[in-house]
Image (spheres, rainbow, N blue to C red):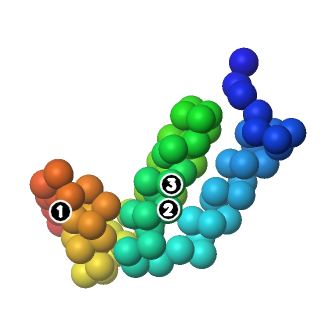
C-alpha cells in the first residue's frame, strides 16, 4: 500500500506537485524536480516528474530553449535533437 503523509492522499500530493511545476521556471525547475524526487512515495513522485518533463519538453522542443533546458535538467546526458 502507498504511504500517505499527514492524512493527504497521494492523489492530492500529486496534484499539488503538478501545480508547483506549472509555476516554476528556469533553474528552479531542476531544484523542484530534485525536491519532488525525495518524496517517500516514489511511484507518485516519479509520475509527477515524468508528467512535468513530458509537458515541458513538448513546449520547449519547438524553439531554441529546448537544448539549454535539457542540458540543465539532464547534465550527465547528451541531448540529440533531430529535425
Q: Residue furthest bottom?
A: 64
Q: Which residue is mark 1?
A: 81
Residue 48 left/right relative to 61: right
The disc, 2 or 1, on the residue closer to the chain's N-terminal end is: 2
Determine whether label 3 and label 2 are within 8 Å by CB: yes
Q: Is residue 51 visible?
A: no
| Alpha carbon distance from label 3 to label 2 | 5 Å
Q: Residue at x 59, y 70 (%)?
A: 22
Q: Which residue is mark 2?
A: 32
Q: Residue at x 17, y 52 (%)?
A: 76
Q: Residues within 10 Å of mark 1 (few under 14, many from 20)?
A: few
Q: Residue at x 55, y 34 (%)?
A: 42
Look at the picture and state if 7 lies above or below 31: above
Q: Residue at x 27, y 66 (%)?
A: 72
Look at the picture and state if 51 lies above or below 27: above
| Alpha carbon distance from label 2 to label 1 | 25 Å
Question: In the rendering, at what x and y percent does residue 49 appear?
Answer: 50, 50
Question: In the rendering, at what x and y percent does residue 46 appear?
Answer: 51, 41
Question: In the rendering, at what x and y percent does residue 24 appear?
Answer: 53, 74
Q: Quadrant of residue 59?
A: bottom left
Q: Which residue is mark 3?
A: 35
Amino acid at each position: 500500500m502507498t504511504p500517505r503523509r499527514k492524512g493527504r492522499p497521494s492523489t492530492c500530493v500529486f496534484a499539488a506537485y503538478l501545480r508547483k511545476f506549472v509555476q516554476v521556471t528556469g533553474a528552479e525547475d531542476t531544484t523542484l524536480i530534485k525536491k519532488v524526487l525525495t518524496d517517500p512515495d516514489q511511484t507518485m513522485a516519479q509520475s509527477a516528474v515524468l508528467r512535468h518533463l513530458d509537458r515541458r519538453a513538448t513546449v520547449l522542443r519547438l524553439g531554441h530553449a529546448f537544448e539549454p533546458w535539457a542540458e540543465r535538467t539532464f547534465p550527465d546526458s547528451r541531448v540529440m535533437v533531430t529535425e
